[in-house]
Amino acid sequence: MARKKILITREIPDEGVKMLKKKFDVDIYPHDRPIPRRELIKRLQSKRYDALLSILTDNIDAKVLDAAGGQLMVVANYAVGYNNIDLEAAKERKVIITNTPGPEISESVAEHTIALMFGLAHRIVEGDDYARAGRYKYWGPQLLLGSDIVNKTVGIVGMGRIGSSIAKRLHDGFGVKILYTNRSNNKDAEKQFGAKRVSLNELLKRSDFVTLHVPLLPETHHLIGAKQLKMMKKTAFLINTSRGPVVDEKALIAALKKQSIGGAALDVYEFEPKIPYALRTLSNVISTPHTASATIETRQSMSRRAAENIIAVLSGKKPKNKVV
Ligand code: DGY
């Protein structure tokens, strides 16, 4: 029997690729950049693939699915988020969509988020810039004064796996008070870390750090805008490692310029990969290029998960991480 065919749209860490190569014919887009849409469509039309392993910059919509043809059984997205995929179009065409959630990715994103919090509070990036520029001439009692995290209040918007991991580490290690919003109560977080579920407005008013962990959905688009930023304390920090459009970037830039909040740390942007000039130059901002999950352990585990999902579907089994 002919081997099934897989297209991987961008080189990924190798463990899952090796698993797939043992069983299937695997093509990988060879360049170190996202596959252009036209190229993706052309490749899908030229070879009848049974599975597609996509990354979050690939827009998988009806046109792409139709180009792939009716034999396409699964699109395994190499990400937890799947806002780059038209789920309705996939359902209509009976194409299974999978993602790559798991404890490893939650831990990595939680660690990165906490690193950003510390970076802001202790002004690590500003200090590094200062030292590199050769500006450190004398020790100063008021040089780069920051703030502590211990005993502060952290507001977690979305108490899922990542939110819980952040709550655990900050509660156990630094005695922070945890406020959270979520669609439903997270009893474990309440019992284990004393987390208190409150309204978004109350969370914004009371928190020293506000960190976002919600998926991008119509109801979370611009969840944090001018009105919400105004509710935050003048000293509070906003951290976003979820999806860029959850924050109204224009409103955030205005708040940062006015210093009506203490600062922000961002791993995601409204019009990614575009990072507005203001966010790249304001001293009360830390930016990373969507690398919150970029540890070798996590990116390999995502590679294995995506491969396992494809192998399951192509062997007629239910994949572990089915989205639709
Ligand atoms: C995800 O998984 O959705 C991250 O944003 C990228 O790893």
Image: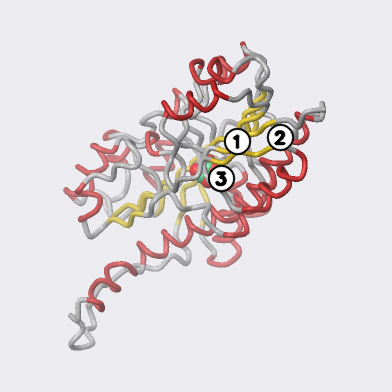
Sequence-wise, the earlier of marks 2 and 1 is: 1
The quadrant of the picture occupied by the C terminus is top right
Inspect the image, locate mark 1, and give the three-letter code of the amino acid beneath it.
Leu
Inspect the image, locate mark 2, and give the three-letter code of the amino acid beneath it.
Ile
- Tell me whether circle 2 and circle 1 mark residues in contact (CB < 8 Å): yes
Q: Quadrant of residue 314?
A: top right
Q: Which residue appears at 41% of the width and 53% of the height?
A: 209
Query: Residue 189 location, x and y as percent?
Result: 64, 48
| Marks 1/3: CA–CA distance | 39 Å
Query: Residue 92 location, x and y as percent?
Result: 61, 11
Tell me the tag on residue 196.
3
Question: Is residue 204 something that shows in the picture?
Answer: yes
Residue that numbered label 2 is attached to? 310
- Tell me whether circle 1 and circle 3 mark residues in contact (CB < 8 Å): no
Residue that numbered label 1 is attached to? 53
Sequence-wise, the earlier of marks 1 and 3 is: 1
Sequence-wise, the earlier of marks 2 and 3 is: 3
Inspect the image, locate mark 3, and give the three-letter code of the amino acid beneath it.
Lys
Q: Which residue appears at 47% of the width and 35% of the height?
A: 199
Query: Does dot 2 land on a helix, a strand or a loop?
Result: helix
Q: Which residue appears at 49% of the width and 29% of the height?
A: 83
